[in-house]
């Protein structure tokens, strides 16, 4: 497993202020169990009848070169023989998944009008919907981004919070990358210490990969799983996920709310940064509530930022889902609400590609939208917390073999 299995996921500390009210609910949005797992034998997808299809025409209106690039990245992933190991899933074969992207890309590029595009999609494709957290398709869409941070290869007064390399005794599943525990001298496995105990023990001393400004920067990179670092000598360094401990994840945003330091409508990355700057000890204590600990490695960065498929993810065109239950690499239609950089709500009905996953993205009721790189993208990601619908488009069985040259 490498850094891409965790991807560059950022839940931006959970529960930001912009929420979507388009789905009728009987309890507050923060009380919904979005990560509810599938019941034994339950499918993550169900076919949607034509009368309930999503707004394919609006998704057509938003097509651009970024969508084409994102689809090309998925097609490149499907071309690799290693991609076949993940199929079939949910009844979708590798050939069907790959050709679906190829055909849909061709239709988006070559259809002479929206009406022609809709007609061709209806003729050749089936649409499947995530069953969501409640069996009726409710999905929570949060946001993530790739952060830019200043850093140093050596510890000094400006950079004194380390990011660590992977320990040799960290054991993960060779196929899924899931952490299994810590290997003891007798070959048995034990649970890793908590974040607080691991850092205070000093046992990671000597495995520092790089130093960042403070614990909040380090924690943000932990949650994202990768970062582009601007070094003190002016060079760029790219670091990515190299494994994590088997301890549970707890979002900093929820801890801040539980401590009464912010109200839900005031919660954001910037607000947490202000709290940290005024009282770092209090926020450090809340950071320790997240027992999970992430390790890193340096890489070339040629395809940065990359998702779990190993291909470059595209702003507002790449999505992260639970790859244990959803097909990889395919085209999805996301229908939800997003926040602008000024905090305003707007409808978001776009085609995207399923190219990433994350430690906190589990079950059919959760998905993460990649918002981009840098501070502006971070603001948008930090404001993303809205319900919506998640649809997958796959060729009908009789259309699988008909692909453009």
Image (cartoon, rainbow, N blue to C red):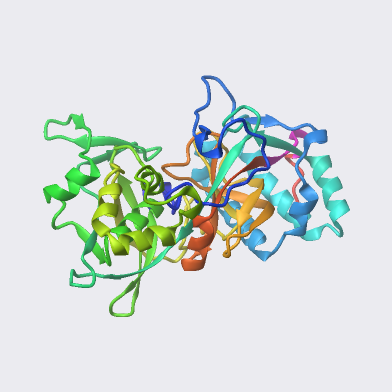
Residue depicted at x 12% and y 30%: 186
Question: Could you say where residue 223 lies in the image, as x and y percent from the top left?
Answer: 38, 51
Question: Could you say where residue 372 lies in the image, as x and y percent from the top left?
Answer: 52, 62
Question: Could you say where residue 86 lies in the image, as x and y percent from the top left?
Answer: 52, 37
| In-image side of 330 versus 82 (left or right) | right
Question: Could you say where residue 77 lies in the image, as x and y percent from the top left?
Answer: 54, 51
- Residue 203 visible: no
> How many numbered badges does the structure rendering display?
0
- Residue 319 visible: yes
The quadrant in which residue 346 appears is bottom right
Give the vertical position of 31 relative to 167 (above or below). Answer: above
In the depicted view, which residue is nearer to us: 70 or 80? Answer: 70
| In-image side of 56 versus 148 (left or right) | right
Outermost residue on the top side: it is 40
In the depicted view, which residue is nearer to us: 258 or 134? Answer: 258
Give the vertical position of 81 relative to 297 (above or below). Answer: above
| In-image side of 87 versus 184 (left or right) | right
Q: Tell me which segment is drawn in magenta.
A: 392-399
Q: Does the stretch in magenta take in 393?
A: yes
In the depicted view, which residue is nearer to us: 301 or 158? Answer: 158
Q: Quadrant of the N terminus?
A: top left
The quadrant in which residue 233 appears is bottom left
């Amino acid at each position: 497993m490498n850094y891409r299995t965790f991807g560059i996921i950022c839940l931006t500390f959970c529960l930001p202020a912009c929420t979507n009210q388009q789905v009728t609910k009987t309890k507050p949005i923060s009380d919904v169990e979005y990560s509810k797992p599938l019941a034994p034998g339950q499918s993550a997808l169900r076919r949607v009848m034509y009368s309930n299809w999503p707004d394919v025409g609006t998704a057509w209106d938003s097509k651009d070169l970024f969508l084409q690039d994102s689809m090309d990245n998925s097609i490149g992933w499907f071309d690799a023989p290693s991609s076949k190991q993940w199929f079939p899933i949910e009844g979708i074969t590798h050939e069907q998944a790959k050709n679906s992207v190829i055909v849909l890309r061709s239709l988006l590029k070559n259809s002479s009008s929206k009406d022609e595009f809709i007609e061709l999609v209806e003729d050749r494709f089936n649409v499947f919907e995530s069953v969501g957290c409640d069996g009726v398709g409710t999905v929570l869409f949060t946001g993530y981004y790739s952060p830019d941070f200043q850093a140093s290869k050596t510890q000094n007064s400006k950079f004194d919070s380390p990011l660590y390399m992977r320990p040799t005794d960290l054991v993960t599943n060779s196929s899924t990358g899931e952490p299994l525990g810590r290997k003891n001298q007798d070959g048995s496995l034990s649970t890793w210490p908590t974040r607080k105990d691991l850092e205070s023990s000093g046992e990671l001393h000597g495995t520092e990969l790089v130093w960042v400004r403070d614990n909040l920067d380090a924690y943000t990179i932990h949650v994202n799983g990768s970062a582009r670092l601007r070094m003190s000598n002016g060079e760029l360094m790219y670091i990515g996920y190299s494994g994590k401990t088997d301890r549970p994840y707890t979002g900093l945003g929820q801890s801040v709310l539980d401590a009464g330091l912010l109200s839900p409508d005031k919660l954001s990355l910037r607000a947490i940064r202000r709290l940290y700057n005024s009282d770092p000890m209090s926020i450090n204590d809340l950071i320790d509530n997240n027992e999970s600990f992430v390790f890193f490695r340096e890489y070339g960065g040629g395809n940065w930022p990359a998702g779990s498929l190993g291909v470059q993810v595209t702003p507002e065109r790449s999505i992260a889902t639970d790859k244990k239950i959803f097909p990889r690499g395919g085209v999805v239609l996301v229908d939800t609400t997003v926040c602008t950089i000024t905090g305003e709500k707007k409808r978001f009905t776009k085609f995207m590609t399923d190219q990433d996953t994350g430690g906190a993205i589990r079950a059919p009721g959760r998905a993460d939208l990649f918002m981009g790189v840098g501070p502006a993208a971070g603001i948008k990601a930090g404001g993303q917390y809205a319900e919506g619908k998640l649809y997958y488009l796959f060729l009908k069985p009789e259309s699988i073999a008909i692909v453009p040259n």
